[in-house]
Amino acid sequence: MTEPVGYVRYRDDLEQPFPDEEELTRQVVAAMLEANKQVAAKHRHGLRDAHAKSHGVLVGELRVHAGLPEHLAQGLFEAPATYPIVVRLSTAPGDLRTDQVPVQRGFAMKVLGVSGDRAVEDGFSTQDFLLVNHPTLPFGTIGEYAKLQNLLESQPRQSDQQLKVLGAGARVADAVLTRLRRPIPPAAETLAAQNNHILGETFHSMAAVRYGDHVAKLSVAPRSTNVRNLTGQPVDPKLGESALRELVGDFFTEQGAEYDLRAQLCVDVERMPIEDASVLWPEELSPHEVVATVHLPAQDPYSDARRRYADDLLSFNPWHALAAHRPLGSVMRSRRSAYPHSSTFRHDYNGVAEHEPVSIDEIPA
């Protein structure tokens, strides 16, 4: 039954467990662990099972806007405030690939000094938002997500050149099927990313989260002119394997940037489903509305100390969250188990302790 027009009120029964969800989650965790082991053996160092390669680690502020209407003034955004943040820019695969392979990019933001009831009683005072430069998750349910993990498990055995060829084929298929108005296979959609400047991208939560009394998907979009001007700008092949690190480093050494943090509230659970993250929520039903500004000043975004801290010690997890912004849907529920398993493997393999910062002063310069 379709919800009446208006913002959907959050309630526990909006989530509907997927058949065999626990078993499928175990399969996802097992596939992630196998991929972790392959990559760790290859590099003799434990990496993240996803978004292994970082391109910049930034500190800044999240500035919650004053005067938000009631439907937006929820949870972390209930009142105007300024919070310190850490942002890690990354690439999706769980291996260190050349930046000339056009795959999805990530924008993980950790908000510090957050108070309130927790989604999981972890003792932390942080709120993580994990965003990717694609609005949907092609494998949008736990059943399909388990298939994705099997695909990702095979990637460490593929060369960069093989991934480039697969990506080129996927982009051709994407263009043809789009013209024919036919659905794009999830595997092709995953590989069909364009290789553009990471700082000009718009990043999305893909899956839904609780938004206080409501439900939303979140996104971060370029706000300042200097990053808006980078949108759609292709990465120069001459920059080589670490092109994105060079682009991010050159940019932030000279200037800062601002992004809009936006919420798209659910108004219809049939057309804007919570359990299937592959469905694009129509903007004509509910637009993306700005709730805060992400302010990132000029800085050195990739010093050795900062890179080691962010890549080896820090963890970003959608369940590092307030109860008011708990992740929703079967894929997000699987991550409640999957992310800690992956993090534990990485930290144990490298012989370091996971660290959750309390103060922005803990982030190396």
Image: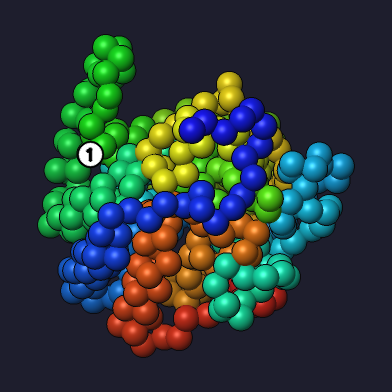
Check disc 1 and report the residue beneath it: 187
Which quarter of the picture shows residue 356? bottom right
Determine the residue positioned at 52% across, 31% down: 2
Q: Crowding near pointer 1: few (<14 within 10 Å), some, many (20+)?
A: some
Which quarter of the picture shows residue 196? top left
Residue 273 position within the rendered picture, expressed as x and y whole percent measured from the top left: 46, 38
Q: How is the image coloured?
A: rainbow
Determine the residue positioned at 87% across, 42% down: 67
| Front-lying residue, 62 or 321 | 321
Residue 47 position within the rendered picture, expressed as x and y whole percent measured from the top left: 33, 69
Residue type, numbered disc 1: Ala
Residue 138 position within the rendered picture, expressed as x and y whole percent measured from the top left: 33, 39
- Tell whether 251 sits left or right of 75: left
Can residue 185 be seen in this snapshot? yes
Can residue 238 be seen in this snapshot? no
Determine the residue positioned at 27% across, 18% down: 182
Which quarter of the picture shows residue 219? top right
- Tell whether 340 sits left or right of 37: right
